[in-house]
Image: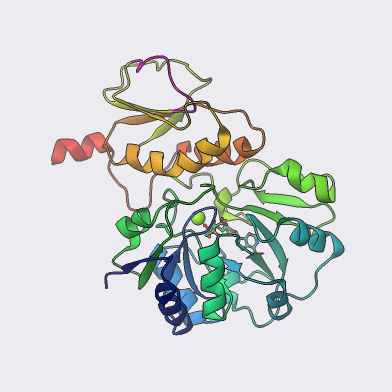
Amino acid sequence: MRAEVLTATDPAAIRLAGEVIRSGGLVAFPTETVYGLGCDALSPEAVARVFEVKRRPSFDPLIVHIGAQSSLDRLVQTISPGEHRLMDAFWPGPLTLVLQKSESVPDLVTAGLPTVAIRMPVHPVALALIREAGVPIAAPSANPFGYVSPTTAEHVRQTLGDRIDLILDGGPCPIGVESTIISMLDARPEILRPGALPLSAIEDVIGPVTCRSGSDQRPPAPGRLARHYATRTPMTILPARGAHVRGTVERAGLLAMSAPVSLGGYTVVEVLSASGDLREVARNLFAALRRLDALGLDRLYAEPCEEQGLGLAIMDRLRRCAAPGQCEDETRSNSERRASS
Ligand code: TXA
Ligand code: MG
């Protein structure tokens, strides 16, 4: 199967995509954060296909995307006043809430958890697709499990294009990092994954929130697995911006937060934002990682940014990319691959 890529501004494309979802198919679509791989959230068969296509471990639950708060009635048990305040403040937008699930949400979606993660995206194509499909849409990021998330239709086509039904091309994602995931189910609200919506914005609405750092082996949000969002090329985070590479790495790439003074011995430099604007950094991050990863370099070096606002999500993704381990489909380093090809 080869996915058709359709321009999302065409109403006929949205109608077709809605039909594909309703009949159990898989549609990749843009959201304001990253591209999602969507299916009918209420169809266990369709959800199973998403896991299969992504090679996603079954312990990693999916986010359910809705277009109106009225859809919650069917999906969750109760909503607390604090949860209501968050929805009113930030939906539609890049905030995912973990809520007590109802019976109608298949266990496959939630990996057997009694909770379900729900978000209402603000991207017009995502909202149009949900409306057209007429069902809630379960959608993980549209990338093979563990790899860098997609922020363009082309990213999706490159890695999943031969395994899904349709790709809606809505241009590059405006934010570029995933939604912030929060749970208010315990006494103190907790951020399970830092993301596009800054912590401070959330605290302005509901007061102090815990943001656990670090990772677990079987975490409540596998976006917290130590190694995730990872390039095949090993990555090191530099101790500071502009720090020089030590050692004699043959061919290295630099991921720079702002315009560097010189190439400094790197084979290639990706500047995420000439002025160091974190919104621009987030928007360009995953595409730059994919470009660097395609070059077959020996190592990537990433400059750090301040862990404020969007910087928290950006550093979270970089640390997981740099964590030791391998991509699931990766057994050889780039230098070994070059040597044998
Ligand atoms: O911005 C986003 O959130 C994107 C777009 C497509 O909406 N989606 C996304 O999905 O990042 P995914 O599958 O790549 O990451 C979803 C994260 C996973 O880390 C998963 O473990 C967590 O959400 N999650 C899902 N259900 C959960 C639950 N019931 N409790 C805790 N974490 C949950
Ligand atoms: Mg993901």
Q: Quadrant of the N terminus?
A: bottom left
Q: Residue furthest front?
A: 10
Q: Quick one: 123 or 150, which is closer to the camera?
A: 123
Q: Residue 261 placed where, x, y %?
A: 42, 14
Q: Would you say 28 lies left or right of 105 here?
A: left
Q: Residue 149 placed where, x, y %?
A: 45, 51
Residue 276 visible in the current orientation = yes
Please tell me which residue is depicted at 66% across the width and 41% down the height of the picture. Answer: 213
Q: Residue 101 placed where, x, y %?
A: 70, 73
Please tell me which residue is depicted at 28% across the width and 38% down the height of the picture. Answer: 333
Compared to residue 92, the image places residue 109 above or below, namely below
Please tell me which residue is depicted at 52% across the width and 37% down the height of the picture. Answer: 280
Residue 59 visible in the current orientation = no
Please tell me which residue is depicted at 39% across the width and 15% down the height of the picture. Answer: 246
Magenta stretch: give its range: 256-264
Q: Quadrant of the C terminus?
A: top left
